[in-house]
Amino acid sequence: MRIASRVIGGVLAVTLLSQLTACGSIFYPDRRGQIDGKIDPAIAALDAVGLLFYVIPGLIAFGVDFATGAIYFEPGKTAQVAPEKLQQAIGADGKVDNAKLQT
């Protein structure tokens, strides 16, 4: 009986901790307050992992991220760079100069 309760408690603790780390409002608190935009696929995938393993916490994670706006990219910031800007920013050593990407 004692071992069974420890196992259940451990599983519950791991479940709750995994959902806390899968929430976009934890990773990106500066994104809160947005009402629309492009959805960040990384945050959506982490929330979907919660759906696969634990349906109710996964739905809560999606709900919190959509309600706070943390699931959306910041306005003006996207995960893509125009190919012509990227070509100009790559140096002779093959590394990207972030200063050239900003302009």
Image (cartoon, rainbow, N blue to C red):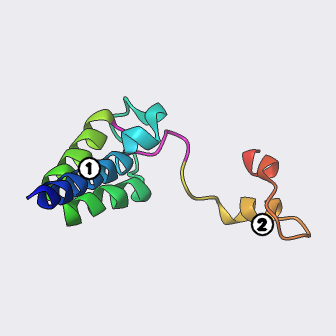
CA gap between label 2 and label 1 equals 47 Å
Q: Secondary structure at mark 2?
A: helix
Q: Residues within 10 Å of mark 2 (few under 14, many from 20)?
A: few
- In the image shown, does 33 or 26 lie closer to the viewer? 26
Is 18 located above or below residue 29 in the figure? below
What residue is disc 1 on?
Answer: 13
Look at label 2 and name its amino acid: Gln
Q: Quadrant of residue 102?
A: top right
Disc assigned to residue 87: 2
Q: Furthest-top residue in view?
A: 33
- At a point 48% along the width and 32% down the height, the residue shown is 30
Q: Furthest-front residue in view?
A: 2
The magenta stretch is: 69-77
Q: Is residue 92 left or right of residue 28?
A: right
Give the foreground label among 2 and 1. Answer: 1
Q: Is residue 84 left or right of residue 4?
A: right
Is 33 located above or below residue 66 in the figure? above
- In the image shown, does 69 or 4 lie closer to the viewer? 4
